[in-house]
């Protein structure tokens, strides 16, 4: 009985060893296959999961159940150039960069201005757009410039460069989680001004039926770019490649004209790597 039990244990150990070896071999082979099938380290091979916003037209927004806007349409075109699709998911801007870095999203798409502080959390691709700060105020407000905000109740979206600006200027801003919150404060008269991305501020004023007006604008000091997790160089380089291709084929210029008609492009701004010519909107249409 003891001999038979011992032999049974030996057989079981041998079988376990074979299963373990097989599993290790499969894992090794699977890792190679996964890398080949998913060279950009995406959450789902072949699909970029992009965190974006629902309420910031014309940059990023939800329309009839579909995520659209300049940034998102451009990302879809960029991804297509490198053989990828995009799945957009709505989130709050204040959480977006940490969600990208924690790999909840592969990419952050929300007119994200590149700053040194943000580079500590995520990596950025090449710049694809420029931006202005807009100053929105309630209709009838006497405020006409950024130099008149001291002592005023100024609202900003938390975590944005407009938040940074207001803090740097010691305005003690009121922080809200999204753009709808900022617009509602102006409409309700609970804020004197909103420092916004100018394009979003323009659209919000136009849609406010006369309750909000744009008081001033000033050029933002840095470009906007797509954010990726720290160290994901292959995805960042793929996005840079795709961006240059959509610049060269006129898609970038066409989307600029579609979403920002009449907006002048600063003479010192060049999208992408700067190595490809930028067609004029008329040539791209």
Image: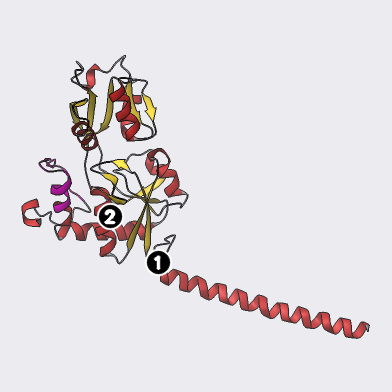
Q: Position of residue 273 (x, y in %)?
A: 22, 54
Q: Residue at x 67, y 78 (%)?
A: 19
Q: Badge 2, how many Cα within 10 Å: few under 14, some, many 20+?
A: many
Q: Quadrant of the C terminus?
A: bottom left
Toward the viewer: 66 or 214? 66
Q: Of callouts 2 and 1, which one flags the residue occurring earlier in the amino acid sequence?
A: 1
Q: Secondary structure at mark 1?
A: loop
Mark 2, mark 1: which one is toward the viewer? Answer: 2
The colouring scheme, among rainbow, by chain, secondary structure or one colour, is secondary structure
Left or right, 26 with reference to 12: left
Q: Position of residue 107 (x, y in %)?
A: 37, 52
14 vs 37: above or below: below
Q: Quadrant of the N terminus?
A: bottom right
Residue 176 in which image quadrant:
top left
Toward the viewer: 227 or 212? 212
- Residue 205 appears in the rendering: yes
Q: Residue at x 22, y 25 (%)?
A: 211
Q: Main secondary structure of the magenta part?
A: loop
Task: Give yes or no for residue 237 being in the magenta stretch.
Answer: no
Instruction: Please report the bounds of the magenta region as a residue range.
Output: 254-271
Q: Position of residue 248 (x, y in %)?
A: 15, 59
33 vs 187: above or below: below
- Residue position for label 1: 39
Task: Give yes or no for residue 267 being in the magenta stretch.
Answer: yes
- Residue 164 appears in the rendering: no
- Residue farthest toward the right in the current orientation of the protein: 1
Q: How far is the residue under mark 2 from the one under mark 1? A: 18 Å
- Residue position for label 2: 75
Q: Badge 1, how many Cα within 10 Å: few under 14, some, many 20+?
A: few
Q: Secondary structure at mark 2?
A: helix
Q: Residue at x 13, y 42 (%)?
A: 265
Q: Residue at x 32, y 51 (%)?
A: 65
């Amino acid at each position: 009985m003891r001999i038979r039990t011992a032999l049974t244990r030996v057989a079981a150990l041998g079988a376990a060893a074979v299963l373990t070896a097989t599993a290790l071999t499969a894992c090794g082979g699977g890792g190679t296959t996964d890398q080949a099938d998913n060279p950009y380290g995406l959450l789902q091979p072949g699909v970029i999961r992009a965190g974006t916003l629902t309420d910031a037209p014309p940059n990023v927004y939800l329309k009839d159940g579909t995520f659209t806007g300049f940034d998102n349409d451009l990302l879809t075109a960029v991804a297509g150039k490198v053989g990828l699709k995009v799945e957009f998911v709505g989130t709050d801007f204040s959480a977006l960069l940490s969600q990208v870095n924690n790999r909840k999203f592969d990419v952050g798409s929300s007119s994200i201005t590149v700053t040194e502080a943000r580079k500590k959390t995520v990596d950025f691709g090449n710049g694809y757009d420029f931006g202005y700060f807009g100053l929105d105020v309630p209709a009838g407000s006497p405020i006409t410039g950024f130099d008149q905000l001291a002592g005023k109740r100024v609202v900003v979206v938390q975590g944005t460069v407009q938040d940074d600006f207001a803090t740097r200027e010691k305005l003690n801003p009121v922080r809200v989680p999204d753009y709808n919150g900022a617009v509602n404060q102006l409409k309700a008269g609970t804020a004197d001004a909103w420092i916004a991305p100018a394009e979003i501020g323009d659209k919000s004023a136009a849609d406010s039926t006369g309750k909000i007006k744009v008081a001033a604008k000033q050029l933002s000091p840095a470009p906007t770019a797509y954010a990726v997790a720290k160290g994901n160089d292959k995805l960042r380089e793929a996005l840079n490649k795709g961006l240059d291709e959509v610049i060269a084929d006129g898609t970038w210029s066409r989307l600029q004209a579609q979403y920002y008609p009449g907006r002048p492009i600063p003479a010192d701004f060049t999208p992408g790597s700067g190595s490809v010519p930028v067609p004029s909107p008329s040539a791209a249409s």
